[in-house]
Amino acid sequence: MMFFSLWFVPFFHFHPIFMLVSLFLYFLPAFLARHRSDFTAIFLLNLFAGWTFIGWIIALVWALSSERQGPPQPVAAPPPQPPAEGSFFCTACGKPCAAGARFCSSCGAALPATQR
């Protein structure tokens, strides 16, 4: 009977690969947050409260949430450049075209014959 009980002991609980996979899963939130500015806080939460599962879930959600940035700054468009002598603007894209061109060099739109 003693021989049977030794075979029944779960072997995989002490296997090194099982331990490495378990450690990786435990620290998964910290691994996902490794490039964030608040990595240290996520790592400490994961380290000290990750064993409670709710702490692990909070750390995971925090690691996957997007970083807050300031309000978006409007990008100012450059002022339109006046056309060079003998050129005009494309009616499709608004880029300057050379005089006598049949197609816009930027968008490829056919130019009206009156401006050639």
Image: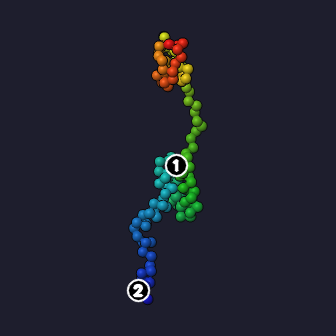
Q: Position of residue 35 (x, y in %)?
A: 47, 48
Where's the N terminus, which quadrant?
A: bottom left
Q: Is residue 46 left or right of residue 14?
A: right
Quadrant of res 19: bottom left
Secondary structure at badge 2 equals: helix
Quadrant of res 13: bottom left
**Rendered view: 42 above or below 69:** below
Residue 82 seen from this side: no
Secondary structure at badge 1 equals: loop
Residue marked by disc 2: 3
Task: Looking at the picture, tell me which residue is in the foreground, 101 or 11.
Answer: 101
Task: Looking at the picture, tell me which residue is in the foreground, 44 or 5.
Answer: 5
Q: Is residue 1 left or right of residue 59?
A: left
The residue located at (56%, 63%) in the rendering is: 53
**Rendered view: 46 above or below 89:** below
The residue at the far top in this view is 85
- Report, in whole angstroms, how far the alpha carbon at label 1 lies from the one at label 2: 53 Å
Which numbered disc covers residue 38? 1
Q: Position of residue 82 (x, y in %)?
A: 52, 15
The residue located at (40%, 66%) in the rendering is: 17
Marks 1 and 2: which is nearer the front?
A: 2
Task: Assess disc 1: are there few (<14), some (14-19) or many (≥20) residues with their C-alpha within 10 Å of its C-alpha.
Answer: few
